[in-house]
Amino acid sequence: MNNRIPVLSALALLLLRHTAALAVEARPCAVDFCYSPPEWQTAICLPDDPQKSLVDKSGELLYHYNQGGREFATRVSVEAANNTVWRSQELDSPRVPIVRTHRTAEGLEILEETFAVTDLARPSAPTPPETTNPVPARNDLLLVHITNTGHEERSLRPKLIVDTVLPFAFDRDKQRARVNHFETITTSLRMAGVEEKGTRRIIQLEQLTVAAGQTVHFFILYSGGGAIVIDPVTVEQALACRERAVEYWQALPLPYQRVQVPDAGIQALVDSSIRNIWQAREIKKGLPAFQVGPTCYRGLWIVDGAFLLEAAAMLGESNDARNGVAYELTYQQPDGRIQVMSNYWKENGIVLWTCVRHAQLTQDKAWLESMWPRLERIAQFIQTLRRQTTNPASVNYGLLPAGFPDGGIGGSIDEYTNPYWNLAGLHAFIQGARWLGKAETADAWQREYDDFLAAFERRARRDMKTDPQGNAYLPIRMDGQDLPQRAQWAFCHAVYPGQIFAREDPFVAGTLAMLQATEREGMVYGTGWNATGIWNYFASFYGHAWLWQGNGRKAAQVLTAYANHAAPTLVWREEQSLRGEKFTKVGDMPHNWASAEFIRLTIHLLALDRGDEMHLFEGLPPEWLGPGMVTGLHGVATPFGPLELALRVDQAGKSATLSVQPLAPNCSGIFVHLPGAPPERLSPEKGGTITFPIHAPLHTAEGQK
């Protein structure tokens, strides 16, 4: 706020940064899932799949979300042997969503592999955006492998468990069970009979004999979709289906190649995040809808979608992202507003930012020009909203009408999330106008923006509070009646990507200090809907704010904490309890705004555009400078064109060489932030290389600078 609100002295600002640096250095950097939730669920569906099949931590298949008065009306599992003990669960690989659940019993090792049968997939790649997504036959396979680790032959009587509140029928003659009248469950073992215990149907399967030291296989097949196709039928066919599923996922043309980091844990989560975004997506109104998740957030959410679309564009999938923007714009109303949710005024600012950012990342002025009349109508609606707050006696004078804050605070109240995002949207809109050469339009809207920002500063000065640690901050509710950190997501967004505050603004430092004071498990605590929990992907909002303020080391440590709150199957829930406390789950899982944020933060630690400058490695973790390590961005979209860079450490770990390809002329300079030295400048027109010693304050440079 241009230093007009005296929150922290310069000395306090320096102390804050020093304290943050010390706290960061004390934290471990390994990705070991040490804060993983105690339960989770993982998507096994195909890209753009209308069938959002899930597998939970126990290995159960989950179907029919929010039907029959239950979270999942149908749950399908198998008991391969008596008294089995769950040991672990992982994916076949980050790019191959075959969920592998490990169990043991006396003298037995049991592996359950659950995946979607890809043989029936039409098409075999993500659905072209100009088509309507079909509802193909869809089969999910639970493939069970039992190994006898003992010295004697074992006889087992496996059981198939179908727990459903929907209509159920068992047909012994046809050797199948049916759920919801037509969805069909078959197995490679003969079904001997069924026992009903409430909603649980326990289907006894034929006896299996496992010789000492040998492995046997059987499977359960769940057939659904728009048609029922019973395939596979034999164990051999099922094993072949597994191999073809691996081939399908490995060959799928998703944009994995863009981001390369030497930390295996971070790389796995980046790759899994990309896959999960396309699994959650669907084709609606003939356009790709980048959805947050497969259950309660299976739909369009404008703020979530903005960052999903940015992540897709950054990864080079500009056509998909553009069609996603087009889908969001189908929600524009005759008066210009964007409305998916009532009183969620921030949707207008978010769409302004989304469109301008998309145009910047794709370097497409013509597209932005074609969208401009629609964007002007959105900006005019924001102006109309402001004209509803002209009473000087009202608490929101000059801002916006009461609205829904979200992110931990419900209702329609006088608050700051809607002003934050509409300021950010107008800021981006003015940038877009100047980029297009619309000087008069930009000047006119600059006056509106300045008046809006001045009104915000007056109200903020009135509503500032101090937390127990002495940090001055602005609460989200104008009445201040909540936790200091609650719903501060929009403040973080106002810092970045909103860029509405000066970098040295003490208001930002004070609010970040307040948030830092709440940290638990390396994350901000109690900022979301769960006052005693962790909002996982808030870590990216928070990390980006620190990064924008110049503390890249802190941002990198936040990324690691973020990674460690994922499940071992490389997915996040929206919110979860602290480790050791009674588990409370909030929101969807897999949560793909979380996926998008992990991608965004990883990339921005390595490359962040600041106005007309490209800054590299502000948040490069020093742990990524080990012997032989390679870090690269390969065609990642930026406002200066695709960025191609590679940082290679020699095998002795004594020096590193950075190579950067040229960028577009609208970039005034490439600034490389090297350890222990001032930033090094490279010419955007020529790119170049920089070689520098590791753990030394000086370096040498080669190439055009």
Image (cartoon, rainbow, N blue to C red):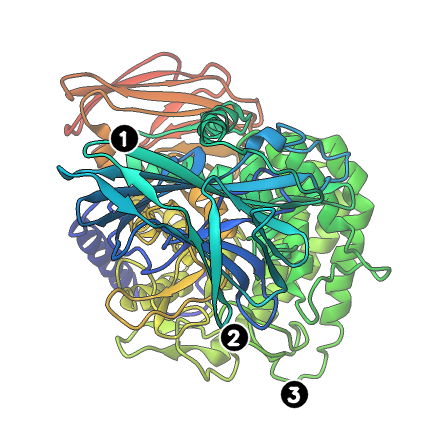
Between circles 2 and 3, the one closer to the viewer is 2
Most foreground residue, 78 or 402: 78
Judging from the image, what secondary structure is the residue with disc 2 in? loop
Q: Specify few, some or many for label 2: CA neighbours under 10 Å numbering under 14, 14-19, or 20 or more.
A: some
Locate residue 385, reporting x and y percent: 74, 70
The picture places residue 476, in percent across and down from the top left corner, at 49, 73
Residue 329, horizontal then vertical, whole percent: 75, 50
Q: Residues within 10 Å of mark 3 (few under 14, many from 20)?
A: few
What residue is rendered at 15% in x and 39% in y?
150
Residue marked by disc 3: 393
* Mark closer to the chain start, 2 or 3: 3
Residues 609 and 564: in front is 564
Q: CA distance from mark 2 to mark 1?
A: 41 Å
| Callout 1 amino acid | Leu
Closer mark to the observer between disc 3 and disc 1: 1
Q: Residue at x 34, y 49 (%)?
A: 80
Taking 456 as reference, is 204 left or right?
A: left
Secondary structure found at label 3 = loop
| Up/down of 584 relative to 210, above or below | below
Task: Give the residue furthest to the top.
Answer: 703
Q: Earlier in the sequence, mark 2 or mark 1?
A: 2
- Disc 2 designates what residue? 409
User: In this figure, which residue is indicated by the disc labeled 1?
Assistant: 674
Which of these two is toward me, 555 or 612? 555
Q: Specify whether residue 496 is in view.
A: no
The quarter of the picture where the C terminus appears is top left
Residue 337, placed above or below residue 274: below
The amino acid beneath tag 3 is: Ala
Task: Name which residue lies at 59% across and 49% down.
Answer: 173
Side of 221 relative to 123 (left or right): left
Is disc 1 surrounded by few (<14), some (14 to 19) or many (20+) residues within 10 Å? many
Q: Amino acid at mark 2?
A: Ile
